[in-house]
Amino acid sequence: MNSINNLFGSQSKNVRIVTIIAMALLLITYHSAKLFGLYITHSGNDYAFLVHIQSVTRLAIIMSLSSLIMGKQKAIIAMWLTIMALIVTQFIDYFSLLNPSFSVFSYLKGFIIPTVITLIYPNNKDDKP
């Protein structure tokens, strides 16, 4: 964290908190739009069971990111557990397809924003968003 403090100077705490909130809101919006597209725009009754499991996982991601914004202590752990669960279900879905039209590594991009959030997340209890 010292290098981040040196990079941003005295305003590093505020910059980190605003960045974390912005990234969390971006992910909340993304997963909410995915759920909206699945269940509101289209009827969600004809999807495979695994899609419904992914939807529950997306709801858990939204809740963990909301907890992160509120500064809950275990929110980072919950965020990682739910994101890993979603990626595991996506890999299961990928390997169950006979001829997928996308790369197996395309799901790994789901780790980019959570990694940045984790790296800039304040260590001190007083600095939480």
Image (tube, rainbow, N blue to C red):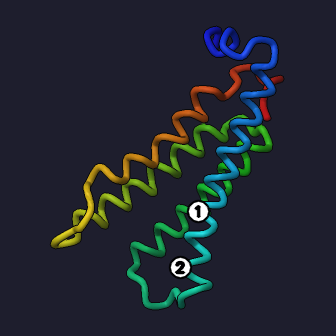
Question: In 3D space, how far apart are the residues under numbered discs 2 and 1 (Cα atoms)?
Answer: 11 Å
Quadrant holding the C terminus: top right
* Amino acid tagged 1: His
* Amino acid tagged 2: Leu
Measured from the top left, where is residue 76 in percent x and y?
Answer: 62, 38
Q: Is residue 25 above or below residue 119?
A: below
Q: Around disc 1, counting alpha carbons within 10 Å, would you say few (fewer than 14), some (14 to 19), or many (20 or more)?
A: some
Q: Around disc 2, counting alpha carbons within 10 Å, would you say few (fewer than 14), some (14 to 19), or many (20 or more)?
A: some
How many numbered dots are placed on residues in this image? Answer: 2
Measured from the top left, where is residue 54 in percent x and y?
Answer: 47, 67
At horizontal 77% and vertical 38% (from top left) the residue drawn is: 71
- Residue, disc 1: 31
- Residue, disc 2: 38
The one nearer the camera, 82 or 43, is 43
Measured from the top left, where is residue 111 in percent x and y?
Answer: 46, 43
At horizontal 56% and vertical 62% (from top left) the residue drawn is: 58
- In which quarter of the view is residue 75 placed? top right
Measured from the top left, where is residue 78 in percent x and y?
Answer: 59, 45
- 10 vs 7, left or right, is right
The one nearer the camera, 114 or 60, is 114
- 69 vs 53, left or right, is right
At horizontal 23% and vertical 69% (from top left) the residue drawn is: 96
Instruction: Residue at the far left: name it.
Output: 98
At horizontal 52% and vertical 35% (from top left) the residue drawn is: 115
- 102 vs 128, left or right, is left
Quadrant holding the N terminus: top right
Kindly check if marks 2 and 1 are in contact, taking CB atoms under 8 A apart as contact. no
